[in-house]
Image (spheres, rainbow, N blue to C red):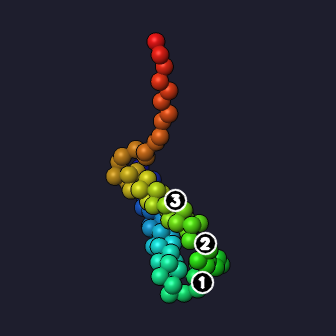
């Protein structure tokens, strides 16, 4: 279990770092501070704001899931409910 917690912490650190980079890129492009922003090999422009926002939301979900796992809570799951007449 300790190994699992260590792995979860490493993954959480990774996703927090990725989220921080994505947010910095989004804000820099949104404020007009730069015309393009580079993350690794990828160059982003204002046209990529919607894609960047989607990636931020995905990273936030990953961080939330990993924090829940680290705190001993199960990951959130969605269930479909189908009402039936009896």
Nearest the eye: 1 or 71: 71
* Residue wearing tag 1: 36
Q: Are marks 3 and 1 in contact (CB under 8 Å)?
A: no
Determine crowd level at label 3: few under 14, some 14-19, many 20+ residues with C-alpha closer than 10 A: some
Q: CA distance from mark 3 to mark 2?
A: 15 Å
Residue 35, position as x, y percentages in the image: 58, 86
Q: Is residue 35 above or below residue 64?
A: below
Observer able to see residue 2 = no
Which of the two discs, 3 and 2, sits closer to the camera?
2
| Numbered-mark total | 3
Residue 50, position as x, y percentages in the image: 57, 67
Q: Say which residue appears at 62% left-offset and 74% top-offset.
A: 47
Q: Say which residue appears at 48% left-offset and 57% top-offset.
A: 62
Q: In the rendering, which numbered label is found on residue 58? A: 3
Q: Secondary structure at mark 3?
A: helix
Q: Say which residue appears at 61% left-offset and 72% top-offset.
A: 48
Determine crowd level at label 1: few under 14, some 14-19, many 20+ residues with C-alpha closer than 10 A: some
Mark earlier in primary sequence (3, 2): 2
* Residue wearing tag 2: 48
Nearest the eye: 39 or 33: 33
Q: Are marks 1 and 2 in contact (CB under 8 Å)?
A: no
Determine crowd level at label 2: few under 14, some 14-19, many 20+ residues with C-alpha closer than 10 A: few
């Amino acid at each position: 279990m300790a190994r699992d917690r260590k792995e979860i912490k490493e993954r959480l650190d990774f996703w927090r770092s990725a989220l921080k980079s994505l947010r910095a890129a989004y804000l820099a492009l949104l404020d007009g501070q730069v015309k393009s922003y580079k993350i690794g090999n990828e160059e982003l422009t204002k046209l990529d704001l919607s894609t960047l926002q989607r990636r931020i939301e995905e990273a936030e979900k990953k961080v939330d899931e990993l924090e829940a796992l680290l705190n001993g809570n199960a990951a959130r799951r969605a269930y479909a409910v189908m009402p039936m007449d009896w």
